[in-house]
Image (cartoon, helix red, strand yellow):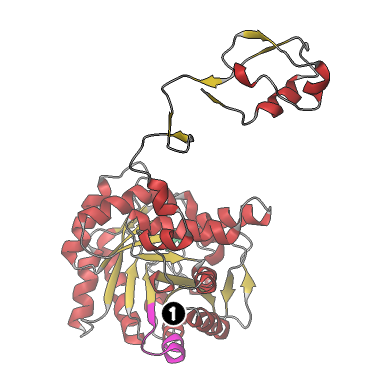
Amino acid sequence: MLYLTAGCSLFAAFSAPTMPAASVVGRAGASVSMVAEAGSILRGVWDGEDLVSVADGVLERNTMGKPWVTQRPRPRRNRKSEAMRRMVRECEVKPSNFIYPLFIHDEASNVAIASMPGCERHCLTSMVAEAKEAYKYGVRSFVVFPKVPDALKTVRGEEAYNPNGIVPRAVSMLKDALGPESIVCTDVALDPYSSKGHDGIVEDGKILNDATIEQLCKQSVMQARAGSDVVAPSDMMDGRVGAIRDALDSEGFTEVSILAYTAKYASAFYGPFRDALDSHPGFGDKKTYQQDPANGREAYIEAALDEMEGADMLMVKPGMPYLDVIHRLRQASNLPIAAYHVSGEYSMLKAAVERGWLDEKKVALETLTCFKRAGADIILTYYAKDASKWICEDGL
Ligand code: PBG
């Protein structure tokens, strides 16, 4: 006979003042007499142990007479020490997996982004300093997102391929400062440059697909000329990956990679990003080009097209609420899969951390590890620098 004692004295101490000293209702529900005096119950002493027992035959005894569950496989053995846990760990997140998104603008100083604590809209010199610091911790890859003054925004977004625009200048500054081992990525879409606040050309309230692609091709070629290593179309027009591939190749940029935003959903989690760039849609929403959050199978269609059209890497965005989509694409494709841990996901963590509700380092590293477990090779995250610092601190 084995007696369960855990929690019993607590039970007695709590129940004593409100219950008659002579009887208590046991866990099994039966009313039983208590042998104990009222005084000993108040002192927290439980002496009714024989009232709670484990039925004969449930537990065996080992040769030392200790309780023994005759169970051979015990998964806890692989968790018994940090060294053991590390030895059997299925995936690990490293600074080299990250792409660090940086917000930039053409002004003399930085501006804080209220809805993204810890992130700033950088002036170009500060952008370089930030990238260099992250590089010290092992981050090699960066993507820049520009805030463009309203005066430069047009319906057709021509500023997107201005060779003297902020993005090409940022790219060459980053490549000069970080050297050839750095990977500088550029976003391809019209929204920062569109007077209508959409990713494509707007006509009669509609987003034109093919006319937009012509602009995106020019934008990609201009970015490649500036030294971009990876162009990342985030616009979700149909057929843009193939057109951009051809445009790049015909200009001799066969080595410039395409990171396709393959399964990009029409998500409310982009709110803080749009604050950062002042790029909220001028009217309506982006549901005619970005995917419906309810659709998982549809991501296979996008992935098959992007793969066929020559994408080098496939991205899922947002990240954490879409781990199932990351997992699906991981299984459907042999290309590297990227996850975008987007602005709203970052802001949610920051808000809880600021209130003292979550431990920032633990919760951020757990989140990033979960992307890898789901099947992502690459993670775009505003935590790239801090997470890399934490990973370095924790050592090999
Ligand atoms: C725009 C673009 C968006 C993001 C990256 N590129 C916003 C949008 O589609 O409206 C969002 C990134 C984030 O929320 O962190 N082409």
Tag 1, which secondary structure? helix
Q: Is residue 17 left or right of residue 220?
A: right
Q: Which residues are magenta?
A: 172-184
- State the image coordinates of residue 134 (x, y, percent, origin top left): 51, 78
At label 1, counting other C-alpha atoms closer than 10 Å, the crowd grade (few under 14, some 14-19, many 20 or more) is many
Query: Image quadrant of residue 88?
Result: bottom left
Q: Please determine whether, in this image, residue 138 is positioned above or below residue 190.
A: below
State the residue at coordinates (62%, 77%). Answer: 110
Farthest right residue? 39
Vertical side of 97 occupied by 55: above or below: above
In this view of the protein, which residue sits in the foreground, 127 or 374? 374
Q: Vertically, is 139 above or below 209?
A: below
| Residue highlighted by disc 1 | 167
Quadrant location, the C terminus: bottom left
Q: What is the tally of numbered marks visible in this picture?
A: 1
Classify the position of ligand 1 by quadrant: top left, top right, bottom left or bottom right. Answer: bottom left
In magenta stretch: residue 298: no
Q: Quadrant of residue 306?
A: bottom left
Q: Residue placed at 47% from the left, 52% from the top?
A: 283
Is residue 318 visible in the rendered image? The answer is: no
Image coordinates of residue 102 in percent, x first then y, are 50, 73
- Tell me if I can see residue 75 in this picture: yes
Amino acid type for the residue under numbered disc 1: Val
Q: Can you give x and y, in whole percent of width and height, for residue 161 in the image?
A: 37, 78
From the viewer's perspective, tell me whether residue 224 is left or right of residue 107: left
Q: Nearer the viewer, residue 209 or 324?
A: 324
| Residue at left offset 57%, top offset 57% | 347
Q: Using the image as rendered, state which of residue 298 and residue 153 is in the foreground.
A: 298
Q: Is residue 280 left or right of residue 120?
A: left
Q: Residue at x 26, y 54 (%)?
A: 329
Q: Position of residue 89 (x, y in %)?
A: 38, 59
